[in-house]
């Protein structure tokens, strides 16, 4: 391109990393005007950050705040190298190889984030963690790399980009850059998940095989992990994280431009598109993987910092819970072991970790190991003088659950009631842990045949969870499944079916269906279907549960063996049905009558005994 003269008739000379008006295209670097040109992390953290503050904005100013008067105005009097018209994208005002180049990464974010507090620090941390040169790490950021002057022109004139062009441009950008950086903040309710562009960008990157890395500002990661240290609360931090994951729903997402919203939804719903449910599930799966990675790395970092042994123990226990719920048992045990290494033996924090290790053993089906661990943890708390504490109340909840698994229902009720008394004395009966305790008491009463007492406990538990907005969590799914089993016992088949369906939905939303806990739920549903005579449906659900247990290496456990037996029983019943059907056809004119066949089935049912609600799971 030929040099353009400024108002004095002289060719402009390069003055700085971010040029003023009427720059010379001839003096520009080779990437100027390239559709994938991005700014370097180095440029953002130095020149860009300095100029934002010099323009009178604060560190907390969002993209919405700085775009009109700072980002857009930067290229107002500069000729665009892409269409040779006045008004340039911000990125085409930047000069020098250290400051701009072909994008190595694409940032997926919202304009509600702060460039100086959210975006730049996260990119700096990413470069540091991955040992990348900030001067050669170029990021495509839409507010800087799309010509905002042309966006405003189209908005004023009502022009719309054709859907085919819209999709082709977007697909090509994601594929050609090849690495998406998705920025999540704040941790308890990421604004990212409410924006349709963000959710769609992550899905497209996953679909085309591009890398997706989730970033979170250091301050947000610190707040998340400190929140995980909480033992009690109306809504524990891990519940907030599950809630954030369940909020992924592209149909409820928003966009600043209505045309963008309509275009993206049309692409998703088209015959060639992924469909809403598939897209939501893929993005949730990605977030689940990020949570595991973030928790593991943050435990390592925070154990090295100046926190008390008690705080470190609580952090490790909270992270272990999340890892186990996400189906990562090995990493959960590793988190507890890491906590034990920094907790003095004989301390309350050490007792807490011993109890957590026992809880993980129970979740894996090792009830005897868990029983010994719970007893030892209680002894340690007694030695520390901490028997009347939140930690011991939680320990007794888990002890009772384990005794129930061991079929010691009276022992389970004793442990639960002891924990209930501690909660009453500490006035912590409105927490999610209290909701779990009440649910457990209800389940034991249900097993003892005290259906009215069970229903009362379930209702109290449900009210706490609804008040704290934690029904859409793994604990909420467990409560709903228990309520479904109770409805089945009470003869309310339709109510039971609806509750089982809801429990599965919550497990899917929280990414915990394909875990051992999810397999237990599916086994309950399989038993329900078998009890209603739907053997084909039972077979399908049981096979799903077996697949999950095989994938999570939890098939060779008490619950896994019970599941295998239930599956065998259904297969035998189906084989008998098929055999009876064949015999009936062959002996159509023989003395074998329908009455005799029915009598045979009745005898078989009498031999097997009456069906159990939920299969006793």
Image: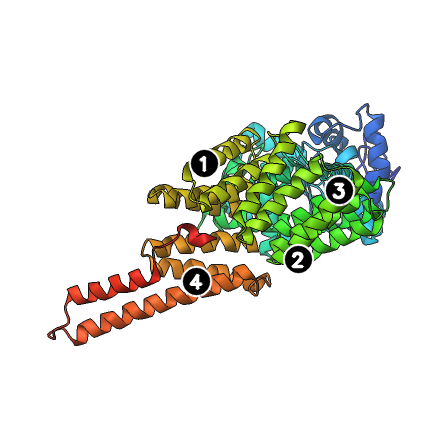
N-terminal of the pair, mark 2 or mark 3, is 2
Q: Residue sitting at 38 percent across and 64 percent down?
A: 570
Q: Does residue 321 appear in this view?
A: yes
N-terminal of the pair, mark 3 or mark 1, is 3
Q: Residue sitting at 83 percent across and 34 percent down?
A: 49
Name the mark on residue 369: 2
CA gap, disc 1 and disc 2: 31 Å
Cβ atoms at labels 1 and 2 below 8 Å apart: no
- Say what secondary structure mark 1 lies in: helix
Name the mark on residue 566: 4
Q: Does residue 25 appear in this view?
A: no
Counting other residues with Cα less than 10 Å from the Cα at mark 1, is it few (<14), some (14-19), or many (20 or more)? some
CA gap, disc 3 and disc 1: 32 Å
Residue at image mark 3:
381
CA gap, disc 2 and disc 4: 26 Å
Name the mark on residue 453: 1
Q: Residue sitting at 66 percent across and 40 percent down?
A: 394
- Say what secondary structure mark 4 lies in: helix
Left or right: where 491 falls relative to 304: left
Please provide percent x and percent y for residue 617. Answer: 48, 53
Left or right: where 594 falls relative to 448: left
State whether residue 191 is above or below residue 395.
above
């Amino acid at each position: 391109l030929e040099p353009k003269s400024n108002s004095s008739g002289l060719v402009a000379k390069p003055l700085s990393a971010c040029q003023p008006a009427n720059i010379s295209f001839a003096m520009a670097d080779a990437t100027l005007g390239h559709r994938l040109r991005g700014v370097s992390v180095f440029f953002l953290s130095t020149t860009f950050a300095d100029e934002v503050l010099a323009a009178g904005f604060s560190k907390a100013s969002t993209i919405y705040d700085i775009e009109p008067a700072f980002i857009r105005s930067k290229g107002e009097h500069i000729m665009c190298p892409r269409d040779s018209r006045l008004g340039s994208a911000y990125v085409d005002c930047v000069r020098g190889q250290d400051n701009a180049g072909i994008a190595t990464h694409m940032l997926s974010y919202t304009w509600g984030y702060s460039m100086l507090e959210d975006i730049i620090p996260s990119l700096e941390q990413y470069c540091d963690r991955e040992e990348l040169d900030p001067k050669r790490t170029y990021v495509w950021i839409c507010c800087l790399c799309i010509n905002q002057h042309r966006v405003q022109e189209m908005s004023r004139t009502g022009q719309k980009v054709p859907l085919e062009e819209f999709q082709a441009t977007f697909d090509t950008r994601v594929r050609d850059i090849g690495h998406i950086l998705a920025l999540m903040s704040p941790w308890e309710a990421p604004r990212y998940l409410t924006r349709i562009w963000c959710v769609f960008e992550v899905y497209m990157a996953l679909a085309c095989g591009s890398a997706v890395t989730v970033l979170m500002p250091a301050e947000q990661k610190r707040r998340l992990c400190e929140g995980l240290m909480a033992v009690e609360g109306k809504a524990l931090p891990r519940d907030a994280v599950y809630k954030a994951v369940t909020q992924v729903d592209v149909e409820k997402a928003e966009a600043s431009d209505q045309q963008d919203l309509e275009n993206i939804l049309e692409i998703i719903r088209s015959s060639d598109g992924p469909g809403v449910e598939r897209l939501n599930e893929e993005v949730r799966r990605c977030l689940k993987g990020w949570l595991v990675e973030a928790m593991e790395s943050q435990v390592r970092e925070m154990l090295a910092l100046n926190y008390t042994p008690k705080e470190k123990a609580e952090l490790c226990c909270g992270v272990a819970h999340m890892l186990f719920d996400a189906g990562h048992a090995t990493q959960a045990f590793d988190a507890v072991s890491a906590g034990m290494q920094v907790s003095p033996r004989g301390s309350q924090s050490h007792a807490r970790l011993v109890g957590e290790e026992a809880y993980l053993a129970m979740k894996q089906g090792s009830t005897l190991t868990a029983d010994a661990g719970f007893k030892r943890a209680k002894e340690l708390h007694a030695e520390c003088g901490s028997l009347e504490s939140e930690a011991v109340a939680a320990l007794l909840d888990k002890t009772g659950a384990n005794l129930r698994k061991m079929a010691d229902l009276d022992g389970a009720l004793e442990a639960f009631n002891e924990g209930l008394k501690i909660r009453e004395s500490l006035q912590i009966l409105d927490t999610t842990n209290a909701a779990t305790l009440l649910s457990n008491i209800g389940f034991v009463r249900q097993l003892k045949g005290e259906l009215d007492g069970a229903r009362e406990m379930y209702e109290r538990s449900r009210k706490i969870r609804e008040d704290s907005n934690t029904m859409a969590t793994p604990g909420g799914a467990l409560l709903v499944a228990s309520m479904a089993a109770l409805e089945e016992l009470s003869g309310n088949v339709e109510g039971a079916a609806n509750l089982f369906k809801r429990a599965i939905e919550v497990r899917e939303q929280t990414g915990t269906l394909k875990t051992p806990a999810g397999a237990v739920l599916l086994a309950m549903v399989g038993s329900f279907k078998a009890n209603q005579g739907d053997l084909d449906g039972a077979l399908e659900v049981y096979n799903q549960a077996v697949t999950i247990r095989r994938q999570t290496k939890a098939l060779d456990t008490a619950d896994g063996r019970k599941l295998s037996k239930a599956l065998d029983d259904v297969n035998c019943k189906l084989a008998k049905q098929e055999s009876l059907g064949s015999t009936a056809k062959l002996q159509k004119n023989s003395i074998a009558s329908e009455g005799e066949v029915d009598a045979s089935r009745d005898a078989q049912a009498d031999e097997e005994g009456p069906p159990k609600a939920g299969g006793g799971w």
